[in-house]
Amino acid sequence: MNRQSALLTGKTILLRPLNGEDAETYYHLFYGDEVRRLTGTKKHITKEQIEQYIARKSGDDSSVLLLIALKETGEVIGDIAIQDIDPHNRNANLRIAIGDERHQGKGYGREALLLLLDYGFGILNLHRIELEVYSYNARATHVYESIGFVREGVRRQTLYYNHEYHDVIMMAMLENEYRARYLKKEQ
């Protein structure tokens, strides 16, 4: 397992950049039926396409793509990204996926989200971070709301998956909401 230096370190996980050596892991991590359903992924992607994707992302100033790894073992369990960064309006989109069901529901995603929100509002100086979640992903919706994301709307019947249409819930957090909730006020 690649135990590369972490960009961000939490209590149980670390977030680190991808490199070419991660293509195989990345490919297998997100190929399971459940993770494909939760992310709305329909297209089948080859390992070569994953390698090209990683190469493109390494030179992309409009996104920060990181792997989520267990701090103790270095095992990669997911990915998280701030993408579509608009430096003029100071906003971006966030996405996250925990690949293996045995790592879901253990708080790793929540910890990764908090690390990346701190990075986004602190280091990147963003004002607004938004995300989208499919209506059938109640667990993720609950986590986002518990962290402080606010529902802003619903795009009705946006995703056609497995013979059904599904809504997309749009959520966002503003810099002042994050600071009020997570940063202690200096006295």
Image: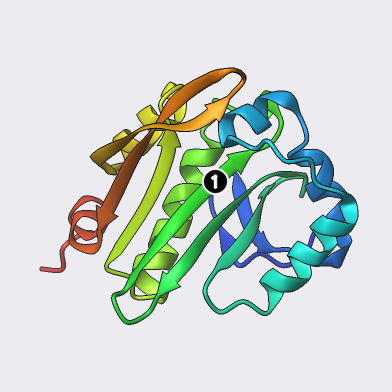
Q: Is residue 1 visible?
A: no
Q: Position of residue 171 (x, y in %)?
A: 31, 44
SS at badge 1: strand
Residue 8 in which image quadrant: bottom right
- Residue at the far left: name it: 187
Q: Is residue 4 left or right of residue 109?
A: right
Q: Position of residue 115 (x, y in %)?
A: 47, 56
Residue 18 in which image quadrant: bottom right
**At 38% across and 31% down in the image, what residue appears?**
141
Q: Is residue 166 left or right of residue 49?
A: left
**At 41% across and 43% down in the image, what residue appears?**
132
**At 54% across and 69% down in the image, what residue appears?**
63
The colour style of the image is rainbow
Q: Is residue 127 left or right of residue 55?
A: left
- Residue at the far top: name it: 163
Residue 5 in which image quadrant: bottom right
Q: Nearer the viewer, residue 159 or 29?
A: 159
Up/down of 31 relative to 73, above or below:
above
Q: Is residue 52 visible?
A: yes
Q: How many marks?
A: 1
Up/down of 149 relative to 104, above or below:
below
Q: Nearer the viewer, residue 3 or 134?
A: 134
- Which residue has dot 1 on it? 96
Can you say which quadrant of the picture contains the C terminus?
bottom left
Q: Nearer the viewer, residue 100 or 5?
A: 100
Amino acid type, callout 1? Ile
Q: Position of residue 78 (x, y in %)?
A: 66, 44
Q: Position of residue 121 (x, y in %)?
A: 34, 67
